[in-house]
Image (tube, rainbow, N blue to C red):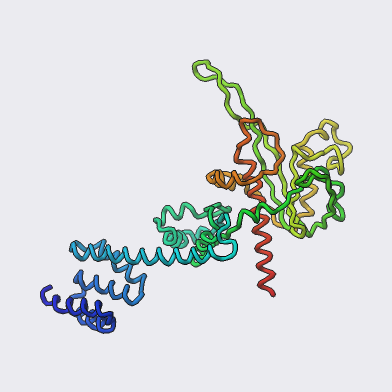
Amino acid sequence: MAQSVPILKQIQVALAAKDYGRMRQLLLQWQKVDPKNPWFRLYVARWCEATEQWQKAEKGYRRLLKGVSVPKVVTQARQGLARLEARELALTQAAIAQEKAAPGGEAYGLMVLEPISPKQKKTAAQHFATVLRTDAYSAGLQLPLKSWRLFRTGALGELRFLKKALTQGNIPSFCLSLAQLQNIPVIQVQTIEQLDPHLVFRGLDETQQVVEYTVPWPEISQWVTGMLPIFEESLEKDGRGKSYYKTKILDYAQFCDLHWGDRQLILRLNDQHYQFQQGLSFLEASQNPIEQLSNRRNWNQMQHRLAPHLTHGQQWSDFKSFANNVRDFPELLRKIQPQVNLFRQEAHQDTYWDPAWHLYSTIIFAHGAETQSEAIAHKN
């Protein structure tokens, strides 16, 4: 070690003078004599940092912290890591500020993670952990394998920056502004008058005015199906015979949203609102009259009749998984007007299921429209 002291001082002088060529020559000389010396390894990391080889510098400092017990070397290695982290933070903040300064960057938005294949998970989790500054195990728990996962809300510029960082690790995601979702009108379909050759229906627009539309089937780009629970308060007794009310699921309301992409409209059907006794009949006339009054029977037959006309579009039916995820975002849900037209008892009016359905459908609609616009722009 004693022989290394003079060369160490020369390296320190070269570093202070920013003579990185001279510093490299001295390090190569030292490497031939004592490559395992902790001070040598420290100044290799310092040279990497000075020459902007950030990843190599970080790796060098971290290795010193794991395998070296010389107090001064450990202290300087920690200081080196702190400088690298401060630099990375400054770059991140500058990039986020630039994204926020872009049009719409300050708007409130959301970010959704798209599923990855199980084969990708290990590599993706490592990149995800690096971006979010967490461990790979925790990062892996965040990555979806089967369905969309609402990941974060906030300023759209910041979310766009995060999306770009994840894209570098082949982690698919997308961002939307809340305004994009709120600007999609919803028509509450009351009756279907005709299925062939086009869809003809009557319904209520957002001002509760009766409207009638004729829709060419190819213009329905996507359709979304799901169920919303209907609750009741059931009187129960505990082990001591004391009565109390317990919330139970009484039934499920069936929903089907048809996305009319060409007109930027959502056509919303639900079995609690649809007037099955008017318009086109979906049941055979010979069927039991009591069955003809059954909403569930009518709904199932209507879905059966609609399906052949919708084969060209994509069906989305993973609402339950999405709802269980989005319940962790109460701030976002409070900003959503559900437009589901379900009667809710006062105790259940704040249920997350209703805004979650509208959020799910509008996210699918807006993302589909954005993807289509990008594809058209790419062709041109």
Residue 215, percent from left and from top: 82, 55
Residue 68, percent from left and from top: 21, 63
The C terminus: image quadrant = bottom right
341 vs 212, left or right, is left
Residue 88, percent from left and from top: 39, 66
- In-front residue for pair 372/103: 103
Q: Is residue 324 above or below residue 243?
A: below
Q: Is residue 241 visible?
A: yes
**Quadrant position of residue 72:** bottom left
- In-front residue for pair 331/2: 331
Q: Residue at x 33, y 67 (%)?
A: 58
Q: Residue furthest left?
A: 2
184 vs 17, left or right, is right
Q: Is residue 170 visible?
A: no
Q: Residue at x 77, y 41 (%)?
A: 299
Mark count: 0
Q: Is residue 359 above or below residue 264?
A: above
118 vs 248, left or right, is left
Residue 359, percent from left and from top: 63, 49
The N terminus: image quadrant = bottom left
Q: Residue at x 51, y 60 (%)?
A: 158
**Quadrant position of residue 136:** bottom left
